[in-house]
Image (cartoon, grey):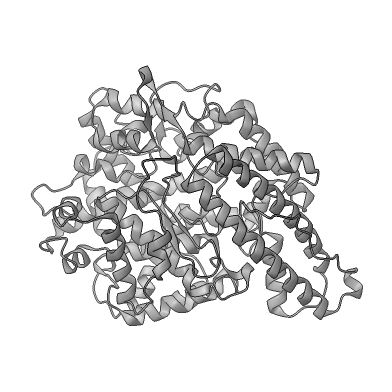
Amino acid sequence: MLRRALPLLSLLALSCTKPAAPAAPPSADAVAPDEAKLFVDEVDAELRTLWVTAETAAWEQATNITPETEKAAAAAQEKVMEFLGGAIAKAATFDDAETDPDTRRQLTLLKRATVLPAPPDAAKRGELATLATELQSMYGKGQYCPKGKCSDLGALSDVMSESHKYKALLDAWKGWRTISVPMRPKYERFVELGNEGARSIGYSDLGELWRSGYDMSPAEFEAEMERLWTQVKPLYEQLHCHVRAQLAKTYRGKVDKDGLIPAHLLGNMWAQEWANIYPLMEPYKGQPSIDVTKALTANKYTPTKMVQLAEGFFVSLGLDPLPKTFWERSMLEKPADRDVVCHASAWDPSYNDDLRIKMCIKINMEDLITIHHELGHNYYFHYYYQQPTLYQQGAHDGFHEGIGDTLALSVTPAYLHKVGLLDAVSDDPKAVVNKQMQDALDKIAFLPFGLLIDKWRWGVFSGDITPDRYNAAWWDLRREYQGIDAPVERTEADFDPGAKYHIPANTPYSRYFLARILQFQFHAALCKAAGHEGPLHTCSIFGSKEAGAKMETMLSMGASKPWPDALEAVTGTRTMDAGPMIEYFQPLMGYLEEQNEGRSCGWAGNE
């Protein structure tokens, strides 16, 4: 997960003195181009100071959850909200002024530089800052404690990923959702105050503000998301159909072979990725294992050694080694003496190549892939950190997530063999289908989940989903898009959206859907640069300086140009396209269509 962009988004910051927004410019008719540039320069300097302090405070809270760090984070958020509220409003006064392209770009980015704008009223601003901090801390400290024996998310997730016992899975699933019930009234008020802040800077609600961050209109962005989903939906439906049939065999009488899949049977606390049920889905038995978890243990890998392996991948592309401070300041393991947010994230708190990751690493293949992803964020930071502050982000937020995922696509059996974690690489078509099934249970299964999280929030922010329907609307979307359902009755006494980190943390989610699409588009272009010949799924860019140079060009742009320019720098096209994803999974699609012959695919509500 990208943490570093969050100062541009949720804006946790700390300042010892009350920050003042730059002086208001005169009316647009009287504004000279150099006045707009002066304003941008002043904002850049102030934001750098605020956001550096902000990220430091946020890091302290995330790696040591205490009343003191929570209080500091709340105070910090309030101060930055106040500054940005004024700066964004004043940026709008330059809308009709003549400016150079660079200044205009920074003004545009400034006007959408927050996903949590503050209400003008000081008391409400403080209340919103406190709520934002409390909600995230409630998630981070969440535990399920039946009969006095407590389990945190890590322990409950282990049950979800390792057990195939129906009752144990159900207990873990229900247990984690007890932590979000107290969030519900706080979240309702959070939405009210956030919308008030959005209206104060010219948007109808928070959702419209969020959808404005993609160099297109909010309506165009919604249409773009649906267009991309339409491209990949047939592949998801084939996967869903096969998974449902296999689960019906494993959990006899518990899964309707023609209906919705119970959410707790998919190997993940949120049923967002299904890779943990691969042993139940393995197409062909007797093929070499593609899971290197046992090899990591046998080779005495530690969290540090796993990160060093991932760093070696980036260095092989001709990119720089990580700075020494990365190894001194990162949190790679869960501390035994304090509460922390284990959700993996990448950081540059100083906006100055202060690269870090925060992660409670487990010695398994899943975390090895995640580490490659997080370092992708870090290398993005590294190559744009000398840009102006407003440019220190991805071309759009899907780029940041997508570049990490792109590198993870090159963690192929051939790559794992080269680094000594896989004894042999099979060219048997059955082995290919096995590997693609594992990948699809992660990447294809995720797509509708990645789409619906923000669909739910956009409805909440606009008022189309009212507080008395928060949970009902959540499950309506889960059924419609994912074809899954809650395993037990849920009511409005529950608040199941809050059991997913990105809801209480107020982190937009469309980026993850876009990243799943973009990673294959990036991968295809980088493989071409690397001179790869053969099917796309066999390509690893490991060791290709040519691919590394092309990637570095895009990374160094940051957000200095509209995202189509950055996309064109890598792919040669200015349009996001799911075609490379479909191409990548052609072997699996053929297998799924064969397996689903004669089955009734689809589900009610997905016509």
Going by the image, does 534 lie left or right of 119? left
Q: Position of residue 433 (x, y in %)?
A: 20, 55
Corner quadrant of residue 606: top left
Quadrant of the snapshot with the C terminus: top left
Q: Residue furthest top?
A: 147
Residue 27 to residue 53: above or below:
below
Residue 440 to residue 189: above or below:
below
Going by the image, does 94 lie left or right of 114? right
Q: Position of residue 572 (x, y in %)?
A: 46, 77
Q: Is residue 6 visible?
A: no
Q: Position of residue 9 (x, y in %)?
A: 61, 54
Of 607 and 486, nearer the camera is 486
Q: Position of residue 392 (x, y in %)?
A: 57, 68
Q: Residue at x 34, y 24 (%)?
A: 171
The number of numbered badges drawn on the structure is: 0
Q: Residue at x 47, y 79 (%)?
A: 553
Q: Is residue 342 visible?
A: yes
Of 224 and 212, nearer the camera is 212
Q: Residue at x 75, y 52 (%)?
A: 82
Going by the image, does 328 lie left or right of 397? left
Quadrant of the snapshot with the N terminus: bottom left
Of 95 and 304, nearer the camera is 304
